[in-house]
Amino acid sequence: MAALTRVSGSVGLISLLNPPVNALSAAVRQGIVDTVRRAVSDPQVKSVVICGQNGVFCGGADIKEFGGHMSGPPLVPIFNTIEAADKPVVAAIEGSALGGGLELALACHYRITQSKARLGLPEVSLGLLPAAGGTQRLPRLIGVPAALDLITTGRHLTGAEALKLGIVDQVTDQNTVEAAVKFALSIVGQSLESRRISTLPCPCPADIDAFFEGVMQRVKKSAHGAIAPVACVQAVQAAATLPFTQGMQREQELMATLFGSGQARALQYCFFSQRVVSKWSSPSGSRWDTSKPKPVTKVGVIGLGTMGRGITVALALAGLSVVAVETQQQQMMAAQHAVSGMLERTARRRGVSLVGDQIRYSVELEAVADVELVIEAVFEDMALKEKLFKQLSTLCKADTLLCSNTSSLDIDHLASQTHSPQLVVGMHFFAPAHVMKLLEVVYGPRSAPQAVATAMELGKRMGKVSVAVGNCSGFVGNRMLMPYVEEASFLVEEGASPEIVDRALEEFGFPMGVFRMSDLSGLDVGWKVRKARGLVEPGQMSRVRQGRRYSPLGDLLCEQGRFGQKTGRGWYLYDSAGSREAQPDPWLQSFLEEYRARQGLVSRRIDSQEVLERCLYALINEGFNILQEGIAAGPEDIDMIYVFGYGFPRHRGGPMFYASQVGLAQVLQRLEHYQQLHPDIPHLRPSSLLRRLVSSGSPRIQRWREIIRMPHSSL
Ligand SMILES: CCCCCCCCCCCCC[C@H](O)CC(=O)SCCNC(=O)CCNC(=O)[C@H](O)C(C)(C)COP(=O)(O)OP(=O)(O)OC[C@H]1O[C@@H](n2cnc3c(N)ncnc32)[C@H](O)[C@@H]1OP(=O)(O)O
């Protein structure tokens, strides 16, 4: 798993051999121990270069090992041995040096990297900290503030950025291993004293206590309950205040608390789930590995409202040519101005050059006649979309893919308006589309595998986490959101305030509770959907509609012109229209009291446990229905949709993983309890799949797909 060869006469070249990313599995660690020992003791070897096979240095510790019994030599003594070697050791970094991979490089005396290589300590995103000396060596090398930034965010750097920060000694655009070997030859005989990072003092800010207090406050606030970022700060603080050996001890202690935590399990599940969802399959049998995407270079975007603008920006940033169509001249000019601004800001933030020249604007639909793929992003109005799809089907090339950004309308119906229904899929982006990572790719029974593969591939090029889902009202994300939002309103009817509900959800880890979120997106959005479904009865207070419990509270607020942040009033009060500072609204409190009195509802005390159980279990229950119906292929799909599109705390793994951690029997029992209390709320009726999983012994989430596919009787 690691090979030693002698090159250029006196350089011992150690190659890590564990495709695809040369993760530091037990066998690789043993390979490093053996090859380093041989290189150090071989008198013909004067210097050493460590590289990775196939253009990747090392993707870090083998995450798959974390779930089971760990064996093989541990990393810390291996890295200490490398650093203590009396022959110079040079890391030749190509591809990636992440986590334990970068820690290995930091134990070497010199680092040479390809300019485009990715370097970083992303352990925090796995619920861990860099525990092979990373928290102690990096601050000594680049100073406390820069190290804290990298370790607490886990962000990746390019080789060029790493050079600027002083993490690497040289960047090359040539063959990195050859450059490292040449360099290794040139430094033989030089003193290594100043090259052993563990022996360096740690450059610290002046008032160290005040500095760490401030950092800790900021990190806790943005962590939303995640424990790893806090432990990362504590470990770096140890580097700043303790000698290396004691700092290493502290690093190990902190790692021990994180390693077995539920948060680490959840975050590692997210890492693998993100990869699982890219390997999509549909009930028709089409799959990621048997469906070849069609090459796409030019995309049409129709409708330049908020969504269309964001999609245009995301496409341009991905290097695609875009034909952006808005039939109203004035809207088009406004959109062009807005898109340029968004591109400028994003390019500045990402430190890349501006990419506006590949966007062509037009007021004519015919401008998309020669594109390979169209994304429709006009108003959520079926009649408008029907007409548009008919027109597109006639004017575009016969093999052009027609995609809709609808968030809930029937994709099959849109497909049926075209000459080639097999070329129609949903591409449901989330606002702001150039920022949010999620893309739901919605297939219907007639969608061609190539159409799904092409939309998935396009999403990947745009940097999205693309999840393939079946067609149903609301698809996966919005369908599950309905019971969640409804439960929140029911709780307010029964005695909770929006603040009580939001506080419970925010303490759980959501960046925003359901009412703050509704105020942000606009209460009129849901009102419009409910109107379209025939649920709204203006001025009416009845709490049963279409045969089930209904809360008219949202409608009543909208009737008062309270649309949320944009009108300065919604579930909360804001200083002014557009302001983001939500204040509890005394008007709303009396409105609710009056409402309850008129409805004959006796207000009761509702605690955060009930808020969490009713909102989350209702959402999870709908997730089980979705799995049962085959709308999502597996729990990972649902979890990635919720983590990347709806702010579900990543350190909880997503709703389905969370349910598996709570225990399926417990979720079932609580749903049964609430259903008895509220028989008029259908979404509290436990899903038959949940019952089936519980009676199968609540298997691990990785086994759910098997159970879902097993034939069963619904009797
Ligand atoms: C009481 C108990 C006390 C406990 C103490 C225990 C101490 C334990 C010792 C810990 C020592 C700490 C060491 C270190 O600090 C910890 C780490 O290093 S954690 C790992 C950090 N590294 C990462 O997070 C990188 C993860 N990988 C990536 O970001 C990307 O894969 C990549 C490297 C940038 C490459 O990206 P792509 O080219 O796009 O490829 P993919 O992402 O699709 O990956 C391909 C394939 O490889 C699998 N894979 C990737 N990285 C790893 C990995 N580190 N381990 C295992 N497998 C990995 C990935 O899942 C894909 O698999 P496939 O889907 O094809 O099956």
Image (tube, rainbow, N blue to C red):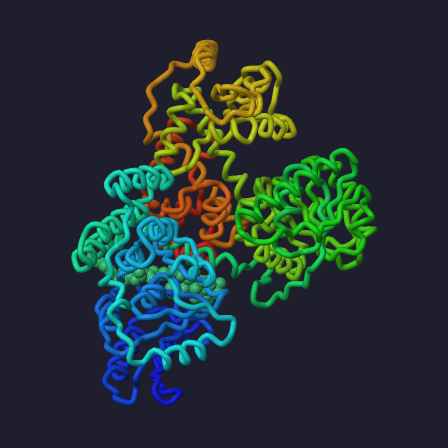
Quadrant hosting residue 99: bottom left
Viewer-side residue, 537 vs 655: 655
Q: Is residue 74 above or below residue 145?
A: below
The residue positioned 42% from the left and 53% from the top of the image is 155
Residue 706, how many percent across, how many down?
43, 59
Viewer-side residue, 335 vs 447: 335
Image check: 512 left or right of 609? right
View extreme (front): residue: 190
Is residue 225 in view from this perspective?
Answer: yes
Picture quadrant of ligand 1: bottom left
Viewport quadrant of the N terminus:
bottom left
Viewer-side residue, 534 vs 165: 165
Q: Is residue 636 above or below residue 377?
A: below
Residue 681, how many percent across, how many down?
46, 29
The residue positioned 32% from the left and 65% from the top of the image is 106
For the image, the number of numbered tags is 0
Residue 564, how many percent across, how many down?
54, 24
Is residue 698 in view from this perspective?
Answer: no
Quadrant hosting residue 183: bottom left
Image check: 577 left or right of 137? right
